[in-house]
Image: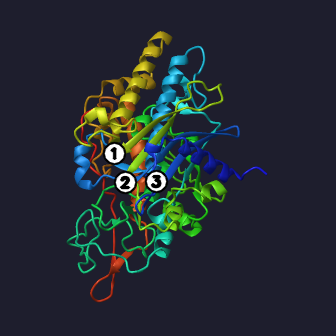
Amino acid sequence: MPLPHADRIAALALSAFASLPQKSKPRLPAAGRAEWVTVAAIVVEDDSTLTCASLGTGVKCLPASKIPLARGFVLHDCHAEILAIRAFNAFLLQECKRSLAALPHTNGSRYIRPRNPTELTLHAPQPFTIRESIKIHMFTSEAPCGDSSMSNTISAQLDPTPWTPPSTSTTTTPSPSTPSTPSQPSPPILLRGRTYFSHLGHLRTKPGRPDSPPTHSKSCSDKLATKQLVSLLLTPTSYLITPSASAYISTLIIPAAEYDAVGCERAFASRLGDMKGFDGRGGYAWRPFKVLPAEGERVAGFEFSRRNVTALEPEMVIPSNISAAMVLDPESPDSGANTYTTETLIGGVLQGRKAFSSGALGASQLSKHRLWRAAREVAGGWLDGAKDSGVDSDSVGKQAMEWMVAQTGSYEMLKVPSSLSASGDKEEPAEEEEEKRECRVVEKMKRARWAAKTRVRRVLANAGDGYLGGDEDGGQIPVDHEWIRNGGNYFGL
C-alpha cells in the first residue's frame, strides 16, 4: 500500500538528511551525552512527482548583542525551518541562472519560467515566476518553536510555573508590577521562548531556554505564519520572482507525535483572522497552508528527534550546535539522480571559520551577502540577454534590473521603501512625489512587499489573550505588542 501523501513527503525529507556526511549530523551518543536536532525541508511537487529542493538542520540563533557584528556574512537564525527557507531561495536563484543560460532556445528550469513582457506590471516587474504547476510542501521533524508547540511545552514541564523574566526592556517581558499608563506607554512586549507559557497566541522570540542570551529572532511559528502573506521569497529573490500562488507553502507537515491540532489552528489561522480577505498589490495575498501530521515509521523512528534521543535516557540531552544546509543542484535533470550542494555550519558560518572575523570566506551560500550577490548576478545576466533580444529601454523589468545592478548602499534600503519610516506608518505619498524617486518601479515593488509584511506583523504582534499576568491588586495588564526588528541590516552592499 502506498504511503499517505504527508508520510511520503516526510520520508523524502529524512532520506535527504540521511545522505548528509556524518560531520553534518549531531554527534553520536557518548559519555552519557546525546544530541538531538530539528530537520526541515522544502519539497516541491510537480505532476505528482516529489523532489526535495532544500533542507536545513539546526536549533541555534545569534544573541541580539552579536547581530551588529554579522554584517551580512553570519546567519542570524539557524533554526532548521529558517535554513530550509533560505536554502530554497538559494535554489530559486540558481534556477534563474539556469533559465537564463538556456534562453532564447529553451527554458533550462523545470521549476521557474521567464515571464512574458505583457505579464510585467508597475507593482510586479519581476522577470521570473515559479511555474503554475508547482506546489510547495514543508516538513519539520519537530513542532515549530513558539505558539504552535506551546501545548507540548506545557505537557513537558515538571514544574508548571513559568519562569519570570528579570526586568522591563524593549527586548524582554516587562515586570507585571509596573502597569502602563496613558501618559507613559508600555514598551513593546515580547515573550521570550517559554515564558508565561500559559498565555497562548502571543508573539515570541527565540530561544526557549531562560539561561540563554536574549535574541531578536522571532519564533518559527511566528515566521511561518508571516509566510502565508509574504510568501517564501526573501528580499533579494523577491526582486526577481513574482509572489504568485506557487511561491507559498501549500502544506506544513509535522510528525504525529508533535502535532497539536488546536495549537496549529491558533498559531497559523485563528490569531491571524484579520488577514482573511487581504489582497495586496504585486501578487501578495493571504494564502494559508494546511497543517498535516505524518505517522509513518520513518518519521516515528527518526534517530535524532528530541523525543527519541530522550527515550535513550542518557545522563544529558542537549541540542546539537551543528547546522547543515542542502540545496538541490539538478545539473542533469534527466539522469534520475538528484545532487545537492551541502554546507556544515557552526555559529552561523561555515564550519572551521570564525564567526565574526572571516568575512565573505566564512559566509554560507544562505547568508544575506551571498544571496544578494547571487540575485545581482541574475539581474546582470537578464540585462545582458535583454540587449540581445531588443527589450524596450522603458520596460519596467529593465528598470528594476538596472536598479539592482547599480545598488551600493546598505542592505536595509533593499527592504524598506524610501517613502516610509522604519515603522511603516507613513501615508501613501502623492503621485508626483513618487515620480521624483530614483526608480519608481522599484519603489512600487518595495511598497507592495512592505505593505504585506507590515500588515501581518501588526496582526501577529497584537495577537494573544490580551493581557500578561496581573498587577499587585490582581488586575489584568493590557498589552500592545510591537514587532521589533533586529537591526542587523545596516551593512554595505
- The residue furthest left is 183
Query: Label for residue 257?
Result: none
| Crowd around label 2: few <14 · some 14–19 · many ≥20 (10 Å) | many
Point out the frontmost of discs 1 and 3: 3
2 or 1: tag closer to the N-terminus? 2
Q: Residue placed at 36% from the left, 29% from the top? A: 373
* Sooner in the amino-acid sequence: mark 1 or mark 3: 3
| Amino acid, disc 3 | Leu
Do we see residue 291 in this rendering?
A: no
Nearer the N terminus, badge 2 or badge 3? 3
Q: Is residue 53 visible?
A: yes
Placement of 425 over or under 324, stated as above or below: below
Residue pointed to by mark 2: 60
- For badge 1, the amino acid type reads Gly
Q: Residue furthest right?
A: 1
Q: Which residue is mark 3?
A: 28
- Please tell me whether mark 1 sits on a helix, a strand or a loop: loop
* Neighbours of disc 1 within 10 Å: few (<14), some (14-19), many (20+): many
- Check disc 2 and give the amino acid type: Lys
Q: Is residue 441 above or below residue 147?
A: above
Q: Nearer the viewer, residue 85 or 329?
A: 329
**Residue 410 versus residue 82 in the image, above or below:** above
The residue at the point 54 percent across, 54 percent down is 277
**Helix, strand or loop for disc 2:** strand
Q: Are marks 2 and 1 in contact (CB under 8 Å)?
A: yes
In space, the residues marked 2 and 3 are separated at their CA atoms by 19 Å
Residue for badge 1: 348
